[in-house]
Amino acid sequence: MQLAENNYLPAWEICLNLGRCDNYQDLKIRQKCLWFAVNNGPSDILGNVLEHMYLLEIQILHKNLELWMPVAEFENLKDEESDTSEDDFTDAMTTVTKIILMTN
């Protein structure tokens, strides 16, 4: 993050790798890293980075939803929607990916 904050442009690749790392749990840092990579990396990475940004946004929104809703209420909501929500999520991500690929 110090490299990005100091605007060290060659660090875009390091930021890209950290932003795409699913094992790193700090979603906000990963998001900042991906934005740095988008702004300072070559244009041919845009499609891939934007795809990861969309997935990261969904994870952040999901985490925020968990914080705002009482645990029992959230679990009940997950159980009620478990059958269709996974299919809807897959359909939504497939649509986003197709749109990204079509624009490239």
Image: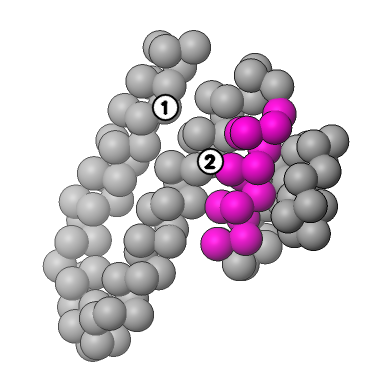
35 is within the stretch colored magenta: yes
Q: Quadrant of the N terminus?
A: bottom right
Q: Residues within 10 Å of mark 2 (few under 14, many from 20)?
A: some
Task: State left or right for residue 97 relative to residue 30.
Answer: left
The reply to whether the magenta stretch includes residue 3 is no
Q: Which residues are magenta?
A: 27-41
Asked where in the image residue 5 lies, by quadrant, the reply is: bottom right
Asked if 39 appears above or below 6 in the picture, the reply is above
Spatial CA distance of label 2 from label 1 is 10 Å
Residue 7 in the figure: left or right of residue 33:
right
Looking at this view, is 37 or 100 the one in front? 37
Q: Position of residue 65 (x, y in %)?
A: 30, 71
Graded by Cα atoms within 10 Å as few (under 14), some (14 to 19) or many (20 or more), the crowding at tag 1 reads: some
Residue at (23, 53) in percent of width and height: 85
Left or right position of 35 against 69:
right
Q: Amino acid at mark 1?
A: Thr
Identify the disc placed on residue 76: none
Name the residue that disc number 2 marks.
52
For label 1, the residue is 97
- Name the residue rendered at 18%, 72% in the picture: 77
Q: Amino acid at mark 2?
A: His
Earlier-in-chain disc, 2 versus 1? 2
Front residue of 37/73: it is 37
- From what the image shows, is residue 26 above or below residue 40? below
At a point 64% along the width and 19% down the height, the residue shown is 43
Mark 1 residue element: helix
User: Which residue shows up at 74% across the image and 50% down it?
Assistant: 4
On the question of residue 17 being in view, the answer is: no
**Main SS of residues in magenta:** helix
Q: Position of residue 27 (x, y in %)?
A: 55, 62
